Image (spheres, rainbow, N blue to C red):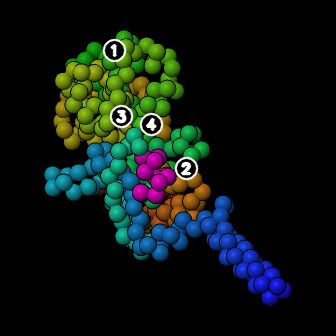
Amino acid sequence: MKKITIALLALLLLTSTLFGAGSKEQGPGVDNSLQKILAKGKLIVGLDDSFPPMGFRDENNEIVGFDIDLARGVAKGMGVELVLQTIDWNAKEQELNTGNIDCIWNGFTITEDRLNAMTFTPPYVNNAQVVVVKGSSPYTSLASLAKKNIGLQAGSSAAEALDNSPAFKASVKNVVEFKENLTGLMDLEIGGIDGLIIDLLVANDNINRSGKDFRILDEHLTNESYGVGFRKGEQKLADEVWAQMLALKADGSLAKIATKWFGADITVVGK
């Protein structure tokens, strides 16, 4: 009997030790996010592949853009493979939290709500939410769009910017949501909507690249910044990505990437 009791106690002690070790390695407050990426040798970036100049498909159906080149430089510095994973932007948080991607990196605006739900790098590019209208239209201000149809990308910071401008939101006739900004711009061109709320960098790129008769209202809805988003608490991975951005800034690579896509170094890394 004593032998059985001793054996049971030994088994219980071993079991508690094993579970204790497991909870110590994987329990709350333990951040092994960077270790996991280095161990698997891949950084899976979730993105919207129709968001030029940050990330989009070129004429060869290859995903290119400023964020793509920047992420590639960061992954190289980390010694891991960059994997680009196209996602539904409206379900990006779910893609991140279920582990399908390691980060959201594609003109991802830092907002208060997102900061509460995720861990971010510091800002690397400044941006703004603006309204694009047809060049021939009579609209000159947000007030002039009263009782008109306004579009935006579903799940984007444009929706939050509109919510934070209650007087303007209440003044418009309808708010139309699109899966992609490019679809919204097409609808604007044919007159389906009267204005599209969109990122300033994306608007400038589209107007310059397409040569279409669009213009940007001088009055902005909000100023904002882009960052890379990770699961809440994955600070070590975020810190490493930022450290690699600083290294790209120091050796001049970041300025070359920015100039390639924007015509000048508009980044705010290390500033």
Residues at circles 1 and 2 in contact by the CB criterion of under 8 Å: no
- Of helix, strand and loop, which mostly describes the magenta segment? helix
Q: How far from the left and from the top, in percent, is residue 202? A: 32, 40
Residue at mark 3 to residue at mark 4: CA–CA distance = 8 Å
**Helix, strand or loop status at disc 1:** loop
Residue at the image position 39 percent from the left and 61 percent from the top: 44
Residue at mark 1 to residue at mark 2: CA–CA distance = 35 Å
**Helix, strand or loop status at disc 4:** helix
Name the amino acid, label 3: Gln
Dot 1 or dot 3, earlier in sequence: 1
Q: Residue furthest front?
A: 1
Q: Tell me if residue 81 can be seen.
A: yes
Span of residues in magenta: 92-100
Residue at the image position 36 percent from the left and 65 percent from the top: 82
Q: Is residue 53 above or below residue 217?
A: below
Residue that label 3 marks: 153
Residue that label 1 marks: 148
135 or 93, nearer to the observer: 93
Q: Which disc is residue 118 wearing?
A: 2
